[in-house]
Amino acid sequence: MPLTATTVVVPIDFSSESPRAIAAALDVVAAGNQLHLVHVMPPLETMSPGFLVGEITEESRRQKVTAALHKLAADAGAGEATLVALIGTPGLEITDYARRQQADLIVIPSHGYHGVKRLFLGSVAERVIRHASCNVLVVRRSDAE
């Protein structure tokens, strides 16, 4: 039985694995407008130089991320997708957004970090799996053995 969904959230980190996650999501929807491409940015530090002099604002960051999402979506054949730039903790923001959208599925790429690197960086995919209220499809890395 093929996998189908009507609302799919695809977390985007702009890595080389992001287009593969979009392609996997396009395989389970009837139309690109059923996709929600979501990027989560960390909050600005109030003492960061760009913030202090007013050159960087949350809105300017959102605009740049949305422009990059638009290009990625168009290049991946998902130009009709909803594009969202959020601020916060990635795993939690992704699952909260999916819950608000009543998503059927989250399609997330795995970077396959292990050992010490995973210990220090954490795993967004793992956090999404633990906190999601819908199914989660983890797309295997393209260079995984």
Image: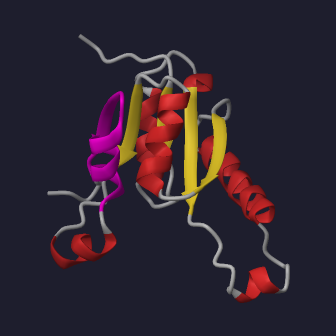
Q: List x then y, in percent, for residue 117.
A: 25, 76
Q: Where the N terminus falls, by quadrant?
A: top left
Say if residue 139 shows up in the picture: yes
Q: List x then y, in percent, for residue 110.
A: 30, 53
Q: Is residue 109 positioned above or below 134 on the image?
A: below
| Residue in view at x 60 percent, y 34 percent | 78
Q: Is residue 122 positioned above or below 29 on the image?
A: below
| Residue in view at x 74 percent, y 54 percent | 67
The part of the chain drawn in magenta is 123-140
Q: Is residue 10 positioned above or below 66 on the image?
A: above
| Residue in view at x 49 percent, y 16 percent | 6
Number of marks in picture: 0
From the viewer's perspective, tell me whether residue 127 is left or right of residue 11. left
Coloring applied to the structure: secondary structure
Q: List x then y, in percent, for residue 34.
A: 57, 23
Which residue is more in the foreground, 102 or 29? 102
Q: Is residue 24 positioned above or below 51 on the image?
A: above
- As drawn, the residue found furthest toward the right would be 54
Give the image quarter of residue 20.
top left
| Residue in view at x 35 percent, y 27 percent | 134
Q: Where the C terminus falls, by quadrant?
A: bottom left
- As drawn, the residue found furthest toward the front would be 46
From the viewer's perspective, tell me whether residue 47 is left or right of residue 14. right
From the viewer's perspective, tell me whether residue 126 is left or right of residue 7. left
Q: Is residue 34 magenta?
A: no
Say if residue 22 shows up in the picture: no
Q: Is residue 129 magenta?
A: yes
Give the image quarter of residue 118.
bottom left
Which residue is more in the foreground, 68 or 85? 85
